[in-house]
Amino acid sequence: MANINTRGDRAYAVLLDSGNLVLRLPDNTTAWQSFDHPTDTLLPNKKFFLRYKAQVAMRLVAWKGPNDPSTGDFSYHSDPRSNLQAFIWHGTKPYYRFIALSLNRVLVSGEAYGSNIATLMYKSLVNTRDELYIMYTTSDGSPYTRIKLDYMGNMRFLSWNGSSSSWTVISQQPAAAGDCNLYASCGPFGYCDFTLAIPRCQCLDGFEPSDFNSSRGCRRKQQLGCGGRNHFVTMSGMKLPDKFLQVQNRSFEECMAKCSHNCSCMAYDYAYGNLTKADTMSDQSRCLLWTGDLADMARASLGDNLYLRLADSPGHTSEDKKKNRYLVVVLVTIIPCLLMLTCIYLVRKWQSKASVLLGKRRNNKNQNRMLLGNLRSQELIEQNLEFSHVNFEYVVAATNNFSDSNILGKGGFGKVYKGKLEGGREVAVKRLNTGCTQGIEHFTNEVVLIDKLQHKNLVRLLGCCIHGDEKLLIFEYLRNKSLDYFLFDDSKKPILDWQTRFNIIKGVARGLVYLHQDSRMRVIHRDLKASNILLDEEMSPKISDFGMARIFGGNQHQANTKHVVGTYGYMSPEYAMEGIFSVKSDTYSFGVLVLELISGCKISSTHLIMDFPNLIACAWSLWKDGKAEKFVDSIILECYSLNEFLLCIHVGLLCVQEDPNARPLMSSVVAMFENEATTLPTSKQPAYFVPRNCMAEGAREDANKSVNSTSLTTLQGR
């Protein structure tokens, strides 16, 4: 505002009822107004310019954090290539694309975005020769309403709730659909299908998946040929693809012909109508063409018609159809006779092998009961499960017949192999030990849970295979293996610098928040440890191994079990001793993991901490005595942030407190990391603490390395 020209006059500020802060001159002209600088928020009746004469278009810029107003990573503004669409950007990369601004029925009178009892918000688009802008309005009598781009990249439509004195989310973009809804997440010729109970990537008509990884998209079942016979199919209710070419002044027939006569044209879309009464543009049509791969699509109840080009399949032409009619007549005559003979043969064969068939049926029923045995939540049972089944021979070829040279690791219920698919895609294949009842429950948990859970900090399930006694799970292959591979090996530990460790801690915390409260069901992992944290190429963490996980109902907060499973040291005391588990059990395991990451010591490696009975006791004693910095891993002493380290050890000790009610929820843990200035509660004495008079100086320098075990410890609770 220091650069505002007031012509030497004394200006004054006025806050209008609309929320616009205006700087006015004595002659009542406006020298500056906040509506021209929207920061991260839009208010009703404010014009958001996508194009305004020769000026740069407006943009929203998110905050850095929930309480940090500095410039963040996310922004919202129009597409530099076309004013017909806008993006949420993550830096310079597209994060989410808003639908092409339609000329059809949706925007003629405005678009209703969503409503609760007292609020209705409309979006209108106005286009003139000099300007193109979006404006939001609300119905009369509505409470305060605003639109905000938050620091996580979500465009939220908020309404003030007077009863709770808080902002209520009316709607949000991207919608909660995991990675499926983000930009081009389904790959070329794939789309996110919102008509399903659980949105997931699907292929366009005439296409099939390229491989297990949905982000790699789809391929044509039958290739197009220039000069060959092609036709167009209508995909209704579609979010139109990105990277289109707009052709001016065309009728529907001309638009279709424009695409038909171009061998490179993959699809077209057409609409006709005025934007608004303010429109003075002569062209009232919209003809869009796509000449390359179609990307970033979705399907919902509202959307446009996409006319997709496909090659004519055998039998599609009139000549082929005529031949098919003759074939049908012949088949209708012959097939009944063949069916009668076949039935007689099958009845006799079935009678001779009835006992064998009945035995197999009983085995199949028992197996199905075991496979569904862990579906304890009625909410989950009512959902349709859609697994990606994989051919067994396909998996055998990918793993070189389960060669020992392909083994990545071994667990309590089987082995994990590295596999390579036909297209060169690398995968990890978990092979269940045959004849293991607990293994079947483990298998079921992994398939059901990972199929339903989608988050960037959870491992991705690509498919599964059941072939006789063989039960296989196919996961994305993570080249950097697991956290313990680096953390507990002195030769590899230097790769984990402080920033990498801090990012891993925050990533695991976000993954647990998703499991505990943000997903469609509340999930308790029960076996969180360093070996179950996998690392991708950028060393970002992904929580894996959901074989021990349990699903809680909507009102369930804890459960009891007589069969305690997990890894000693990571299990909370109430779970290990009494079989009681809840989200606070995972909080305890997370606290142990944090202490391992910042110290470089394994929870079970008592020889690394000298006279202390365990790692938790060591951290507590040093923290209580004001010597917490002695707990830091000597490998990172020269490059770590003391403030971030003190925050981590404090949060870690809060998470391992003996009283589960005193431990924070994982959502609170994430808030602590996001806002480092927050005053944290005082940590109480942790579990498994036995005081001794000792020091830990130099404890790690001469210690032998320790590699985390993959074995499972099973305890029987009292």
Image (cartoon, grey):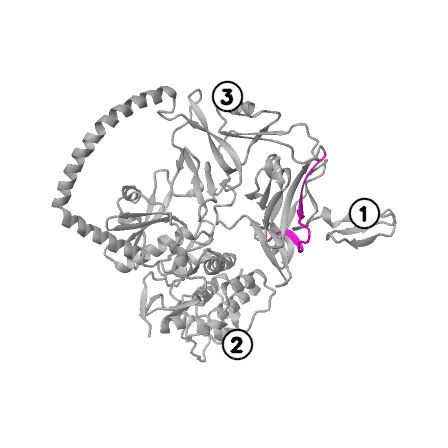
Residue 213 image point, x, y percent: 41, 43
Label 1 residue SS = strand
Q: Secondary structure at mark 3?
A: loop
Disc 3 from disc 1: Cα separation = 54 Å
Q: Earlier in the sequence, mark 3 or mark 1?
A: 1
Pointer 2 local density, CA inside 10 Å: few below 14, some 14–19, many at least 20: few
Front tag of 3 and 2: 3
Which dot, 2 or 1, sits closer to the camera? 1
Q: Is residue 372 left or right of residue 258?
A: left
Magenta stretch, residue numbers: 130-150
Q: Is residue 297 above or below residue 442?
A: above
Instruction: Give the residue number, with chain letter if any, for mark 2.
Output: 625
Give percent across and percent down for residue 170: 58, 53
Residue type of the residue flagged with mark 1: Ala
The residue positioned 18% from the left and 52% from the top of the image is 359
Give the dominant element type of the magenta stretch: helix, strand or loop. strand
Between 388 and 460, which is closer to the camera in this rendering?
Answer: 388
Quarter of the view holding residue 548: bottom left
Q: Which mark is residue 261?
A: 3
Say what secondary structure mark 2 lies in: loop
Residue wearing tag 1? 31
